[in-house]
Image (spheres, rainbow, N blue to C red):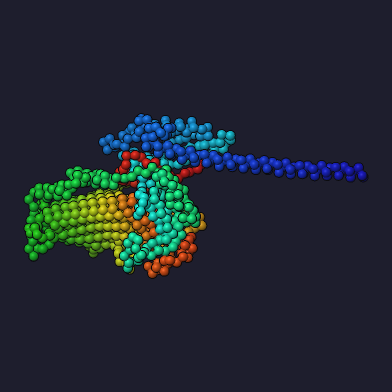
Amino acid sequence: MMKNEKGSSLITVLLVALIFMTIGLAIISASINGALRTEIRETDIDVTYQANNIMEEIIADLKLAMQKKDPRNPGQPLPEKYHLSLLKNGGTVDPSFDQTLEDLREEIIIPKYLNLSSSVESLEIEDISEKEPYLINKHLHFTRVLEIKVTVKDTHQATVKRTMKRNVILSPTPSFLQYAVGSLEEGDNKGLEINGSPNILGNVFANDLKISENAKFCPTNKVCRPNNDEWLEIPTPYPSIFGDIYSEGKDLRTSSSLGEDHFYKQKMPLFKNDSHFIDVNFKKTFDTQADELLQKTDGALQYSDGNFTTHFNSYITDLVSTSQPTLLPSSDDADTVDLKDLSGTPITVLKWKNPGQSMKLSNTSNLELSEPLKIDGDVILSNTHSLTIPRLIVNGDITITNYGDLEIDNLYATGDVTIANFIGNHSSSTKKGFVKNSMIIGGNLEIINDTDFQIGERPSDDSQSTGNVFVYGNTKLVTNDRPFTVRGNIITNGDLFISGNDDLNENEDDDFIFDSVLYVKGQSFISNVNIIGADNYDKQLVLLSGEDLTITRINEFKNFPNMNEPDDFKGEVTDNTNTIKPLKAFFYTHKNAELYGVGSLFYIEGGLFARNHLVINAIRGGQADNEGDLKQMADDRNQPNLQTGKYSRFNVKYDKKVLLRRIDDLPLVDELQVIPDAIELQ
């Protein structure tokens, strides 16, 4: 019995020892595996970091190559074999352009990195310009999209590898088009000045950046000038920027004393002082674009020689004096002539008997003219039915009052053109006013729309829209509670005015729908409107102004349905109800712009750049329902706390489509820009 008990005790001891040994080995194994997993994780992080650095270096080398510098030796010029020429041959891109770009990739960039380190397992750079969603016509445009894919492995653990992919746009456009917000100049009353708390999703450019925690606004009953005491200020949080801040070789953090405490919730963006900024020669660009538009419309006209008015007047005079005119009566009993009464006779040119009076024409029936309508002298035209004119040529001023369906293919006038588009009782079509192809105006252009008006049309093959307009004077487009569509480009030698209903008691839901590039030599004024991209928000407006830009009363005292930012807010405003319609536009001024997201609520999908001085004033939240509320908020030191966690009233979201739409109509430079897209880790 005792022997059996001793044997049992021995077995128990051995069993307990085995259990503890197993547990010990398990602990040791777990520790070893944990250490191995930690090592692999650390290696994975290191490899990802290496891949990101190599991707950044590849993009930097592409930028050097576009500047004709050798990526293998930046101090030396790139061999001439790899120089990319931006000259077209017979209006199309020379085939050598794409071959040179391919040689640059395959013979310079890729070999450098494959030979750089054993950690680079593979590197591919593919031209995807013609694929969705870019669909770039490589025969007509120099813009290219490259897909860069690099795989990096650990030199000690080859199984640990990471593949990083990034698309890069090469575009012969000036640098301002690649930033959400920016300004080039520096000094007093220059640069980028942010007062208050706008929200910017995209990169920012500034050689001079000033940030203040107070948003300014001017009461309507005051006259506010720089540095006077009429301004009111509302304390706010600081701005939120979801992107990097670029400059040309300037450390803005040091020069402007900018730290975490100057940004919303102390989330400071990265500062990068390595921007290679390519400026635009606005005058040269304006002259070139004006000449090209006139050449498309009529090859006999030119703007840049400085004699447009003389040439255009002579051109129109020749058109209306080719044959004997039809002299219309001017007696009191025949004050107005109906076009239907003239349709049965061969009419070449209409001319009023009394040259001191304006010709008065009307259309009171459905009429489709097959020949151009030429008028020598000032004219007033009233239309109440359906009227189609293939070509309207006026040697003088023309005023059109339209209550029916008006369609004009082309409109040329040496003087002022005024079109008032009203709702009529006899219209059988939804098309109320329509200029199908082009307008050349020697004076001012004013279009007032109370129903549907459209300039240009979208071709059935989805190629570029028509509707090119050249105005030697000022251009004023007004719409009241109805859509006004512009498909095509407008170039105006004077000032531009785009406005909606200016009644303070009315809703500000006046829509302009754009697929356009607008060049304005003078100032640009926009107020009381929504700017919507054509084709279900796919297109946009690009407005380039030679003088100051003013945008006012946008969504005044309106709010997003939910003004609270989500906890994981990353810069993009969410409004599924479309209560606040984004301004689908990129705005550029060669001079100054000062905008206020205080009473107004700005939501720009595109960008905003002022070459000299850009001032943005913004508060957060929807606490103000009127100007009286704003006055009460001024000097309230608790406002920063009340506004934190609320959507800003000034939001800009960069849209890179600006570089891929209407490429030929954008300002062009002599060098390809390198614009990287988001990184994708595989």
The single residue placed furthest to the right in the displayed view is 1
At 45% across and 41% down in the image, what residue appears? 166
Name the quarter where the N terminus is drawn.
top right
Q: Is residue 275 visible?
A: yes
**Which of the 4 image quarters holds residue 359?**
bottom left
x, y percentage for residue 434? Answer: 24, 55
x, y percentage for residue 101? Answer: 37, 34
Nearer to me, 376 or 495: 495
Q: Is residue 563 visible?
A: no
Query: Relative to 385, is 65 on the left or the right?
Result: right
x, y percentage for residue 208? Answer: 39, 50
Circle count: 0
Nearer to me, 66 or 107: 66
**68 up-or-down from 464: above or below:** above
At 59% across and 42% down in the image, what residue appears? 41
**39 up-or-down from 182: above or below:** above
Query: Relative to 663, is 424 on the left or the right?
Result: left
Query: Relative to 310, is 470 on the left or the right?
Result: right
At 39% across and 32% down in the image, what residue appears? 76
At 48% across and 38% down in the image, what residue appears? 54
x, y percentage for residue 179? Answer: 39, 48
**242 up-or-down from 364: above or below:** above
